[in-house]
Image (cartoon, coloured by chain):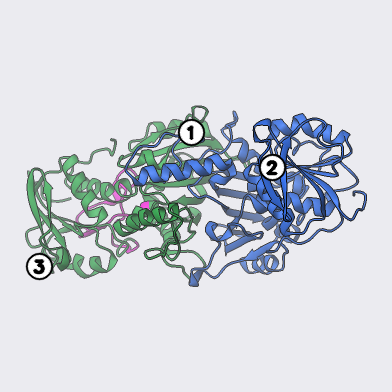
Chain colours: A green, B blue
Amino acid sequence: MIEKKEKYSVAVAGATGAVGRKMLQILEERNFPVGNLKLLASARSVGKDFMFQGKNVIVQELLQDSFSDVDIALFSAGAEISRKFAPAAVKSNCIVIDNSSAYRMNSDIPLIVPEVNPDALKGNPGIIANPNCSTIQMVVALKPIHDKFKIKRVVVSTYQSVSGSGQKAIDELKIQSQEQLNGESSTPNIYPHQIAFNCLPHIDNFLDSGYTKEEMKIVNETRKIMDDDSIQISPTTVRVPVFYSHSEALNVETEGPVTAIAVRELLVKQAGICVVDDPENNVYPLAIQGEDKNDVYVGRIRDDISRDRAVNFWVVSDNLRKGAALNAVQIAELLIGGGQPSQN
Amino acid sequence: MIEKKEKYSVAVAGATGAVGRKMLQILEERNFPVGNLKLLASARSVGKDFMFQGKNVIVQELLQDSFSDVDIALFSAGAEISRKFAPAAVKSNCIVIDNSSAYRMNSDIPLIVPEVNPDALKGNPGIIANPNCSTIQMVVALKPIHDKFKIKRVVVSTYQSVSGSGQKAIDELKIQSQEQLNGESSTPNIYPHQIAFNCLPHIDNFLDSGYTKEEMKIVNETRKIMDDDSIQISPTTVRVPVFYSHSEALNVETEGPVTAIAVRELLVKQAGICVVDDPENNVYPLAIQGEDKNDVYVGRIRDDISRDRAVNFWVVSDNLRKGAALNAVQIAELLIGGGQPSQN
C-alpha cells in the first residue's frame, strides 16, 4: 500500500475542527507510528497549538505545497477544501484520506470502511474516501447480515446528533437549550429552525426528488461500500437534540431466511460491533453511552412482525469517532499494513 | 347516540393530570355544551380548583358513586383507575370516553378517531376508547391513503415527546437538561435512563417478542380503527428530548399505484390534516410548531426510492391534543351529534 517505514509523516488538514481534533486524539490513542505531525488549517487558525505525544504542535496554513514531506494526509475541512488541496497533496506523493463528500462517489476512488471492504483498498489510489457518518455505522452492522442472508431492502430512520454539524452546532444546541429553559426565545443560526427540544427532518440540502443529500449519501455510499447496487434503501434522516452519537432505527429485508437470533449470533462475533441487547433489563444502545467509544452498538434486535425474512434493530455509534476520525485512522492503519480492530 | 339536551353534565376523571387539564381547556375552546362540570381526581388532589367558563370548579374525590348525575365522563387517569371506576359510571347511565389502554382492544368497545371511523360509534356502547397518541396521528394520515390505495405494510419510527409520560416527565427533562448544561450528572427517575440530550428506544414495557407495549398498541389499534387486520406494521417507538408533540417517520407500501403527488392531493383535502411540505424553503412539520395545535401535520411526502407502490412521509401532532384530549372531546361531540372537524 505504502512504502514501509518505522514512522510516517502525517498531516491533518482541518486540524482545528471537531473531527480534526478527534483525529489527533485517535492517532495518539492507537499509537499510530507518527514521525512528523503537521497540523494544517485556514489562515485564521494559524498559530493555535495542540499537544501530541507530549509535544506542542503549532497549526500552519494549509497551502498547495504543504504536503511535499508528508506520507499520509487526513483531510476533514469540507468538500471544497478537499477539492482544492487534495490533488496537490497527491502530486507530492502523499496519500490523502478524505473525510469530505468530495470524492466518495468517484469510481476511481475507494470508499472504505475497514471492517466492511478493506479489500477495496489496493495499490496507491492517491485519494481514499472516508464515508459519511450515518453510512459507516449502518454498513458495519449490515455487512455480516448481507454476507449471510443477502439484503434486499433497508428502511432507515436516523436520530443524528448535532456534533455532525461541527462545534458551532454543539454551541447552538447548548445556547438554545438554556434559552428555552429560561423561557426565552431562540434564533436559529446553524440550523434553519430551533434544534433545542425539537426534531428536524432535514440534514444537508434537499434535492428535486424530495430527499436530502444526507439521505442519498446513505443510499449511494452503502451500495458502493457493499459493492452491490441491488440493495434498495429508503432513508429518512433527522437531526435530534443530542450532542454526540447518531442513533438509527433499521428495518432490513433479506433474500435468505433471516431471524433476530441469527443476526444476534452474527453480530456478536463481529469486530467493531458491540451487541447491547437485554431490553427486559432496560439494556439497549444509547447515544449518551456511545459517546467517545469506538464500537458500533447494536440492540433491540427483533424479528419483523410485519413480514417474513426481515428484522428490526437499533444502531448507535459516535459520529465523530467511528463515523469520521476513527474510520479515517483505521484506513491509515490499513495503508501501513497494521490494521487493528476498532474495539475500545 | 345520547339523549339530546341543551347542556350536558360532564365529568373529567384525572382532571389534574396533563391530559385532564388539556381536556378542560378544549371543552372550553370548542364551546362544548357543558352544563354541570365535575372534576374528579384522587384524594390527594381534592380541593384544587380550576377556572372553567369563568367559574371556579373544585376537584372532588373520584368515587364509585361520582357519576349518578353525569352524562359524559372523560377518563384520563390510567388503565387501573379506568378499570376500577368506568363500569360504575356506565351503571349510572353515564357514557365513558376512556383515554387509557384499559378497554381499547376489547371487541365490544369502539375505538374511535372521529376523522377515521366515526361510524364505529353506534348506539350506546357504555365505554368508548380513545386510542394511543402515537396511533391517532398515524391513522389520521393513513386513512385516506388506505381508502384509495389499500395499505399493505407500514414501517414506522417514532420521535415521541416526554409529555406523553405526564407532567413529571416534563419536569425531568427540564431538570436533567439544566444539569447537563451545568456539567452536572443526572439521575433518571421517570425514565430508566437520562432523557436529556439522548434518545431512548423504549416506550412502555417490553414484551417477550422484543417489542414494547407502545409498539404493539400502534399495530393492534391501527388495525382495529381501520377495521382491517391485513395491514402489516413494523414499529420502533423512541422517546426523544422534546417537550410536546410526537413526530413519526412513515414508510407506507400499498396495493395500488400510490405516488407522493397523489398522497399530497388526498391529504390536502382531509379535515384534521394540514400539509406542510415545501422542503426547498425549509418547510416541513416540526414538533415545536405542532405544540398546542389541533391538526395533524404531514410533510416530506416523497416517493419511496427503494420500491414501487410506496411513499415516505413525516407526521407531527400535539400528543396531548389530537393524541389525547382533543380526540376524546371530538368523540363527545360525535356522541351529542355535533361533530366538528379538528382544524385549528
Q: Which mark is residue A210?
A: none
- Residue B310's x, y, as percent? 62, 58
Q: Which residue is mark 3?
A: A65
The residue under label 2 is B15
How packed mark 2 is, by other alpha carbons closer than 10 Å (few <14, some 14-19, many 20 or more), is many
Residue shown at the point (50%, 50%) measured from the top left:
B242
Nearest the eye: A111 or B56? B56
Q: Amino acid at mark 1?
A: Asn
Asked if both marks, 3 and 2, belong to the same chain, the answer given is no
Which quadrant, please, contains the C terminus of chain A?
Answer: top left
Up/down of A107 relative to B125, above or below: below
Q: In the figure, A1 relative to A41: above or below? A: above
**Three-letter code for the amino acid on which mark 3 is drawn:** Asp
Pair 2/1: label in front: 2
For label 1, count other residues whose C-alpha is less than 10 Å away and answer few (under 14), some (14-19) or many (20+): few
- Residue A80: name its quadrant: bottom left
Going by the numbered disc 2, the residue's amino acid type is Ala
Subunit under mark 1: B
Tell us which disc is closer to us: 3 or 1: 1
Residue labelled with disc 1? B189
The nearer-to-camera label among 3 and 2 is 2
User: Magenta-highlighted stretch: main secondary structure?
Assistant: loop
Q: Which percent across, then down, holds residue A274?
A: 38, 34
Chain holding disc 2: B
Q: Position of residue A311 (x, y in %)?
A: 54, 40
Answer whether residue B229 is visible to the viewer in this image: no
